[in-house]
Image (cartoon, grey):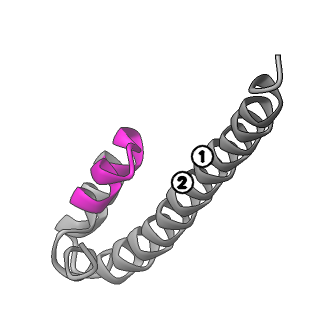
């Protein structure tokens, strides 16, 4: 997806779920002068989107690990009943 930033910045905006920004970026892409602005904008959006996804995945893993530890603790003491 990183190469799409250079050639199709508006696709990156759609990928990051920003449809209005994608339309604006498409208009920037039409002009030669606006193309570098669109590329820079798309690269920033893609970086932010990827870091947000990484954060969400880490939070989900930590939540699952916490739940698993609670379940093991419960199973450890339920054998004595």
Q: Percent x, y for residue 15?
A: 29, 52
Residue at image coords 29%, 46%: 23
Identify whether 9 is placed above or below 65: below
Whether the magenta-drawn stretch holds residue 17 is answered as: yes
Q: Nearer the viewer, residue 28 or 46?
A: 46
Marks 2 and 1: in contact by CB < 8 Å?
yes
Q: Percent x, y for residue 19?
A: 34, 40
According to the picture, the residue beneath numbered tag 1 turns out to be 60
Viewed as shown, does residue 40 lie left or right of 35? Answer: right
In the displayed orientation, state which residue is furthest to the top: 81
Q: In the picture, which quadrant includes the N terminus? A: bottom left
Give neighbour class at mark 1: few <14, some 14-19, many 20+ (Cα, 10 Å).
Answer: few
Q: Nearer the viewer, residue 78 or 68?
A: 78
Identify whether 7 is placed above or below 18: below
Identify whether 67 is placed above or below 27: above
Q: Which residues are magenta?
A: 11-22
Q: Percent x, y for residue 47?
A: 49, 72
SS state under label 2: helix
Q: In the picture, which quadrant includes the C terminus? A: top right
According to the picture, the residue beneath numbered tag 2 turns out to be 57
Q: Percent x, y for residue 74?
A: 78, 29
Residue at image coords 28%, 76%: 5
Name the disc covering residue 51, or none: none
Identify whether 35 is placed above or below 27: below
Query: Quadrant location of residue 12?
Result: bottom left
Residue at image coords 68%, 52%: 62
Q: Nearer the viewer, residue 41 or 57?
A: 57
Magenta stretch prevailing secondary structure = helix
């Amino acid at each position: 997806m990183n190469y799409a930033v250079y050639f199709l910045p508006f696709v990156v905006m759609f990928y990051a779920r920003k449809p209005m920004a994608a339309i604006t970026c498409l208009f920037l892409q039409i002009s030669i002068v606006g193309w570098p602005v669109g590329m820079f904008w798309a690269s920033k959006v893609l970086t932010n989107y990827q870091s947000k996804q990484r954060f969400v995945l880490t939070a989900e893993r930590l939540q699952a690990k916490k739940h698993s530890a609670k379940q093991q603790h419960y199973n450890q003491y339920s054998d004595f009943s």
